[in-house]
Image: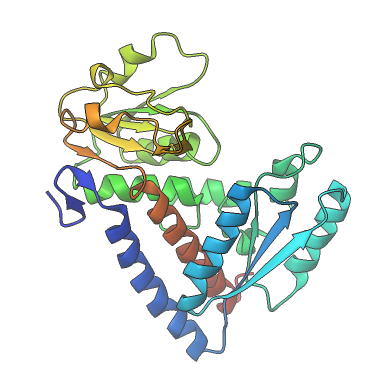
């Protein structure tokens, strides 16, 4: 087992600390060159989850030397007004990164706004140009959660070539990019979703199982192949107030060779990847690539 894990569990907090160290070194070099990374979090309205996420961004990124600005907008603004704000940030030379906080008001399609963020300032890696680059270059800016999943799998030192990977969930920020990246490593990929029939038939065959649907306890022990690597991306609050993942970890952990806990697995790595992406965007602009 690699040093990234404690027992069978992949230690996301330890992995995140390593990422923060590298990011801190990179940002120090940028500041020596006169470049101060500046991330702007755009938020329309408030929810408990989004407020916590914005607060966590500031708490994690500011100590690294990243200037952080929270742009709180009226939730009654139109999509056109929001695009005007985004375009102003695109044109602002002091802003090196933009993150669009979810959820947006129902009337505003997120993909329409994300496409208007300049790819060089897209710290979430959701612009089509960045998604395309990620498939061919794992070191490029990409969706933070997808990068966290790939990093967690790498921490196990399990070779990917020839492995059968099952991904439960086909979102644009996890399922699709993870599947395409692993396909580049010559893994065999099956992606399951709400229309998949007999989910357990697929998951029981997986050498590596990635679950990202937000349904607590969906994956039980009898749905997992002995010795599988299990990556749990889901995080939900149960009716009794507990934080739970998509995998029943008490049942599945003894059966898996490696597993990510919830909390403490993919979550910390995801936030660290936001810091990494922010640094990479600033580096690109410092080199004249914006």
Q: Where is residue 105 shown, x and y percent of the image?
A: 77, 42
Instruction: Answer with left or right where residue 50 lies relative to residue 194.
Output: right
- Which residue reaches farthest top? 197
- Can residue 33 be seen here? yes
Kindly identify the residue that appears in the image at 63 percent across and 71 percent down: 96
Kindly identify the residue that appears in the image at 50 percent across and 57 percent down: 141
Query: Quadrant location of residue 84?
Result: bottom right
- Can residue 279 be seen here? no
Task: Please state the total of marks drawn on the protein image.
Answer: 0
Q: Is residue 283 above or below residue 272?
A: below
Kindly identify the residue that appears in the image at 35 percent across and 72 percent down: 22
Q: Is residue 171 above or below residue 44?
A: above
**Coloring applied to the structure:** rainbow
Residue 127 or residue 186, whichever sits in front? 127
Q: Where is residue 135 shown, x and y percent of the image?
A: 46, 45
Q: Is residue 205 above or below residue 66?
A: above
Query: Quadrant location of residue 199?
Result: top left
């Amino acid at each position: 087992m690699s040093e990234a894990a404690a027992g069978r569990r992949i230690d996301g907090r330890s992995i995140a600390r390593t990422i923060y160290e590298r990011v801190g070194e990179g940002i120090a070099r940028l500041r020596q060159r006169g470049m101060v990374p500046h991330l702007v979090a755009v938020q329309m309205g408030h929810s408990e989850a989004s407020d916590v996420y914005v607060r966590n961004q500031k708490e994690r990124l500011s100590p690294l030397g990243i200037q952080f600005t929270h742009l709180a907008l009226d939730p009654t603004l139109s999509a056109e007004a929001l695009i005007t704000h985004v375009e102003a940030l695109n044109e602002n030379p002091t802003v090196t990164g933009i993150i669009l906080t979810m959820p947006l008001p129902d009337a505003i399609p997120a993909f329409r706004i994300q496409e208007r963020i300049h790819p060089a300032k897209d710290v979430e890696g959701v612009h089509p140009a960045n998604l395309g680059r990620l498939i061919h270059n794992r070191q490029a800016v990409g969706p933070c959660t997808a990068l966290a999943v790939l990093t967690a799998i790498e921490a196990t030192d399990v070779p990917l070539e020839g492995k059968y990977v099952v991904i439960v969930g086909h979102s644009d920020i996890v399922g699709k990019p993870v599947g395409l990246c692993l396909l580049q490593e010559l893994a065999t990929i099956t992606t399951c979703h709400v229309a998949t029939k007999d989910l357990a038939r697929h998951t029981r065959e997986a050498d590596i199982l990635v679950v990202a649907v937000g349904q607590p306890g969906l994956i039980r022990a009898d749905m997992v192949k002995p010795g599988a690597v299990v990556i749990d991306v889901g995080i939900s609050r149960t009716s009794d107030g507990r934080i739970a993942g998509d995998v029943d970890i008490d049942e599945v952990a003894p059966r898996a060779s490696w597993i990510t806990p919830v909390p403490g697995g993919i979550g910390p790595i995801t936030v660290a990847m936001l810091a990494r992406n922010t640094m990479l965007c600033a580096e690109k602009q410092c080199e004249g690539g914006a």
